[in-house]
Image (spheres, rainbow, N blue to C red):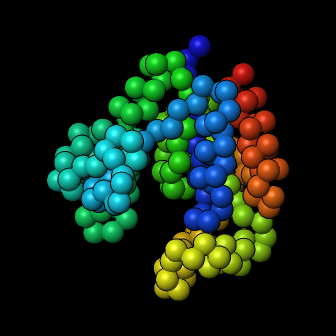
Amino acid sequence: MAGKLIIFSAPSGSGKSTIVNYLLEQRLRLRFSVSATSRLPRGAERHGVDYYFLSPREFRERIAAGEFLEYEEVYAGTYYGTLKSEVERILEQGDHVVLDVDVVGGCRIKEQYGDRALSIFIRPPSPAIEVLRRRLIERGTDSPEVIENRVAKMAFELTYASRFDLVVVNDELHQAQAEAFDHVKAFLER
């Protein structure tokens, strides 16, 4: 059976990473696609584990060579993206790929893989923007300016929800995890 892709996208603070990590712990033959970036490693981050760390020049060369399924220049000279080779490596090993990407990247990957991919948008409960602001403040890792920038980005990202196959509202984490699990399991069994 050929492997499939599960694409997760969500605004920051929606609980997407927690849901993805939960699914990776289940027995679904899911493997996480490691993204590439042109930024330097932070703390204990390791090449090939946390990210594929590329120089800005190498990243641009790989873009020109068509080696990315999707990418974005987040800040001048700082790129993030999904290498085709990473996804194909996992698929060739007979496993399913889990991707954690931004909304634009999620839509691009879905377009390329069509019915072989399931795209899931994780949405915070309504009023989403106020819930996100509160979660980011409670997390205590960002300055007020960063929080407001993330809130503005969220308003943009929420406009993409309807372009995904499914929207899972993360109002109660265990319920959202169970719902995501049920959808993913059904998709993989099809």
What residue sits 28% from the left and 49% below the top?
A: 53
Quarter occupied by the C terminus: top right
Quarter occupied by the N terminus: top right
| Residue projecting furthest to the bottom | 144
Q: Left or right of 16: which side holds 61?
A: left
What residue sits 77% from the left and 74% below the top?
A: 127
What residue sits 43% from the left and 32% below the top?
A: 87
| Residue projecting furthest to the top | 1
Disc count in the image? 0
- Placement of 78 over or under 24, stated as above or below: below
Residue 23: image quadrant is: top right
Q: Locate residue 186, reporting x and y percent.
A: 76, 29
Q: Locate residue 10, reporting x and y percent.
A: 61, 58
- Placement of 28 over or under 160, stated as above or below: above
- Is residue 114 visible to the viewer in this orientation of the structure? no
Between residue 147 and residue 48, name the one nearer to us: 48
Q: Locate residue 173, reporting x and y percent.
A: 76, 55
Q: Left or right of 121: which side holds 74?
A: left
| Residue projecting furthest to the front | 44
What residue sits 65% from the left and 27% below the top?
A: 28
Residue 158: image quadrant is: bottom right
Q: Locate residue 168, reporting x and y percent.
A: 75, 52
- Is residue 45 visible to the viewer in this orientation of the structure? yes
Residue 24: image quadrant is: top right
Between residue 44 and residue 34, name the one nearer to us: 44
Q: Left or right of 85: which side holds 177?
A: right
